[in-house]
Image (tube, helix red, strand yellow):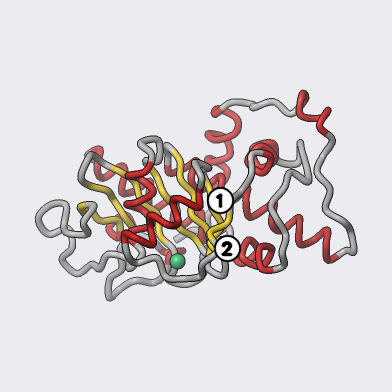
Amino acid sequence: MTALDEQRALVAEGCRVAAARGLVDGILGHLSLRVDDERLLIRCRSDTDAGVAHTRPGDIRLITFAGGAGAAGELDGYRVPNELPIHVETMLADARHRAVAHLHPPAVVAADLAGIAIRPIYGAFDIPGARLARAGVPVYERAVLIRTPALGKEMVAAMRDRPVVILRGHGITSAAATVQQAVLQAISLDALARMSLRVRAAGGTLREIDDADWDDLPDLGPAFTAEAAWRHEVARLPAE
Ligand SMILES: [Zn+2]
């Protein structure tokens, strides 16, 4: 396997993990990975597309930032997502954003529409999620299809240098240095939204954890928070 093939397989795996966690339904949602200064790998659609949950490495195509084929034959039989500007503008805005996940998690959309801001309502339940919430999760307030560079830039501005942004009435964008991190932080955001909705549904009030507790909510490092978590996500995938 070439390095590019390995990256295609990883992006496809990320798509299947996101779908298995209910962060996308049907055929909507896509992941990408920056390859160099001009090109990225992105989940494309074809006439044999069976949905994001069934993404194959071959569905991940090499394209240019302008949306053309990144090498001969890359777009034969494949179509680039309409919302390519989400990926390109997020990557261009910050060199650390090599991987971008655009997903439609219903719980995150519902929590935002219910007027619930994502806050650190728990701690050791999910430390990466708590830390993500503590620093704030911004909202892009438009429900539009982000299919132009201008709209992509508007979304990036709303992101305010945070790794995730909620797109009102639409979904989320999650950006990171790796595919695994982009998907894992989307899973954490979804868990925060689900718990917030659950507490509200039980008649409770959402309260942030005590400030004093942060001293004992350490960053446990990538070996625990990303590598082990990713192994689990892959292991729980349904057999294809
Ligand atoms: Zn979308």
Q: Quadrant of the N terminus?
A: top left
The one of 99 and 76 positioned closer to us in this rendering: 99
Element marked by disc 2? loop
Question: Which residue lies most toward the left here?
Answer: 72
| Residue 114 screen position, x and y as percent | 72, 67
Q: Residues under labels 2 and 1: Cα distance?
A: 9 Å
Assess whether mark 1 and mark 2 are in contact (beta carbons under 8 angstroms).
Answer: yes
Residue at x-position 38% and y-position 39%: 94
Whether residue 186 is visible: yes
| Residue 142 screen position, x and y as percent | 51, 67
Q: Which residue is mark 2?
A: 105
Residue at x-position 80% and y-position 44%: 208
| Residue 187 screen position, x and y as percent | 59, 51
Q: Is mark 1 within 8 Å of ligand 1?
A: no
> Looking at the picture, which amino acid does disc 1 mark?
Ala
Ligand 1 - quadrant of the structure image: bottom left
